[in-house]
């Protein structure tokens, strides 16, 4: 990892000439060391509380060799992680595609009120994205968002609350309902983390309940019929992992209802939630094959511009499949 010589603090409304100075530093190499294919730490001033928020940037290997605008991939860390987490397979694929890779901290692990879907955390992601658009050669018709687990939670929340910001999004094994997830994990470290985030246990008070609700993607997904969102979960998650597949299914069903289209039925949810995880009467779409996924598909459904996949696997994300979905879309 290489850190830029000078700290780069720019909110998304930064003045034109200030943005151009940083653009020259990053893109031409004057005044700071930002090398292609290396993780570079930049700091972006929050437009919400004026603090300096860290973010990792990786420019593709051929970025300095031309003046072509590049797709931007904003990747979000998982529930208990922070800025220092790596997704090397995703970083490698982004580099091979020639995409700019951005990895914001958005207030770190989900153990404080400032993290876990807070207004501050949301603003940090928006600020980082706007900073990249202003200071790098970003193809604004191809701005993508993805995350796994807690990153999947935040991907669904950001995609549904700010759909105009993203060309497409891909959420893996994400939490869609914090209150529901708390009930499963009240006695685990995840339950403890949620109590720290929301001020107590779900059910303790109306005020605390509202914290769980407003930080949950399901509140916004039901109002977002047109989002371009891929939702995916491994069939064994919840049995061997921490997030039951119902979180992904309920998220998809919210989008389906917003589009007045059929979702996954209660009986199908029951069958898929069993350890065997098999449908009695799969639809044609459920029998699809997907080379980018490389796994057996147990269920695949579409609603509006979104897709749900329940695949043979656990609590994981598959980078090739995420990239495959994202690169199909352009505004």
Image (spheres, grey):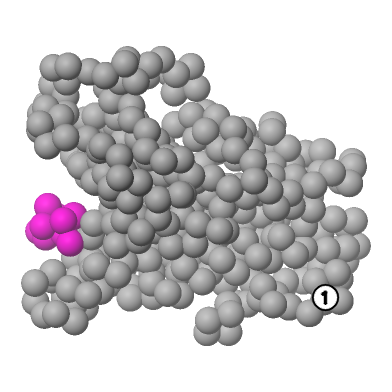
Q: Residue at x 38, y 72 (%)?
A: 118
Q: Residue at x 10, y 31 (%)?
A: 267
In the displayed structure, 68 sits above or below 130; it is: above
Q: As drawn, is 236 to the left or to the right of 16?
A: left
Q: Which residues are magenta?
A: 179-189
The x and y percentages for residue 143 are 62, 50
Q: Nearer the viewer, residue 38 or 27?
A: 27
Q: Which residue is mark 1?
A: 16
Res. 45 image quadrant: bottom right
The x and y percentages for residue 253 are 26, 44
Q: Residue at x 69, y 33 (%)?
A: 97
Q: Residue at x 37, y 38 (%)?
A: 303
In magenta segment, residue 267: no
What is the tally of numbered marks visible in this picture?
A: 1
The x and y percentages for residue 312 are 29, 23
Tell me the SS state at disc 1.
Answer: helix
The x and y percentages for residue 59 are 73, 47
In the displayed structure, 232 sits above or below 179; it is: above
In the displayed structure, 41 sits above or below 329; it is: below
Res. 312 visible in picture: no
In magenta segment, residue 187: yes
């Amino acid at each position: 990892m290489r850190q830029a010589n000078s700290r780069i603090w720019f909110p998304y409304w930064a003045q034109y000439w200030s943005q151009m100075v940083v653009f020259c530093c990053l893109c031409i190499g004057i005044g700071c060391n930002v090398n292609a294919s290396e993780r570079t730490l930049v700091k972006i001033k929050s437009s919400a509380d004026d603090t300096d928020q860290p973010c990792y940037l990786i420019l593709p290997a051929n970025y300095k060799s031309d003046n072509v605008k590049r797709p931007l991939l904003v990747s979000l860390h998982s529930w208990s992680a922070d800025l220092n987490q790596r997704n090397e397979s995703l970083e490698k694929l982004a580099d091979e595609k020639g995409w700019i890779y951005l990895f914001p901290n958005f207030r770190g692990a989900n153990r404080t009120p400032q993290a876990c879907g807070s207004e501050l955390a949301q603003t940090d992601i928006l600020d980082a994205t706007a900073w990249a658009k202003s200071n790098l050669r970003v193809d604004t018709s191809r701005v993508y968002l993805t995350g796994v687990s807690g990153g999947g939670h935040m991907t669904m929340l950001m995609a549904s609350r700010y759909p105009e910001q993203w060309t497409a999004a891909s959420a893996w094994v994400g939490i869609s309902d914090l209150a529901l997830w708390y009930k499963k994990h009240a006695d685990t470290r995840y339950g403890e983390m949620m109590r720290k985030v929301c001020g107590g246990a779900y059910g303790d008070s109306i005020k605390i309940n509202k914290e769980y609700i407003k930080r949950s993607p399901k509140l916004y997904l039901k109002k977002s019929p047109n989002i371009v969102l891929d939702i995916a979960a491994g069939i064994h998650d919840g049995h061997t992992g921490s997030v039951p597949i119902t979180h992904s299914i309920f998220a998809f069903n919210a989008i389906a209802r917003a589009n007045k289209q059929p979702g996954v039925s209660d009986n199908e949810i029951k069958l898929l939630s069993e350890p065997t995880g098999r449908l009695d009467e799969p639809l044609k779409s459920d029998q699809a094959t997907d080379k980018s996924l490389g796994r057996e598909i147990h269920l695949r459904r579409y609603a509006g511009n979104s897709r749900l996949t329940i695949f043979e696997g656990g609590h994981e994300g598959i980078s090739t499949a995420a990239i495959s979905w994202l690169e199909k879309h352009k505004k």
